[in-house]
Amino acid sequence: MAPPTPVLTREEVAPALANSRDCVLASLTQNECHFDGRGYVCVPFQRLFRECTLNKRRVRIEITERNTNM
């Protein structure tokens, strides 16, 4: 079993990111699918991440907002 992943608010992450360096943006496209009675209908959506070096480690923080996929 994978270890638990902490879920932090934007305010909790901000101080740690203030000291980060070498940040890049990354994206991941996923599909949300449902069965409509005849077949599956899938709609793609994107998730955005900020990948930074923090304390000599690479850290990915999701920065997707509600309007990212509008």
Image (cartoon, rainbow, N blue to C red):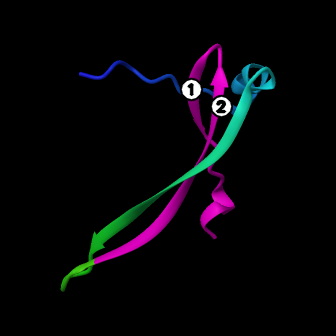
Query: Which of the two discs, 1 and 2, labels the residue nearer the N terminus?
Result: 2
Residue at image point 30% right, 70% down: 34
Residue 41 is situated, as x and y percent measured from the top left of the image, at 31, 78
> In the image, what residue type sits under mark 2?
Cys
**In the image: residue 38, left or right of residue 42:** left
**In the image: residue 38, left or right of residue 25:** left
Residue 4 is covered by the magenta coloring: no
Mark 1 lies on a secondary structure that is strand
Mark 2 lies on a secondary structure that is strand
Alpha carbon of mark 1 to alpha carbon of mark 2: how far? 6 Å
The residue indicated by pointer 2 is 52
Quadrant of the image occupied by residue 50: top right
The residue indicated by pointer 1 is 58
Q: Which residues are magenta?
A: 41-70
Q: Are marks 1 and 2 in contact (CB under 8 Å)?
A: yes
Q: Is residue 54 above or below residue 34?
A: above
Residue 60 is covered by the magenta coloring: yes
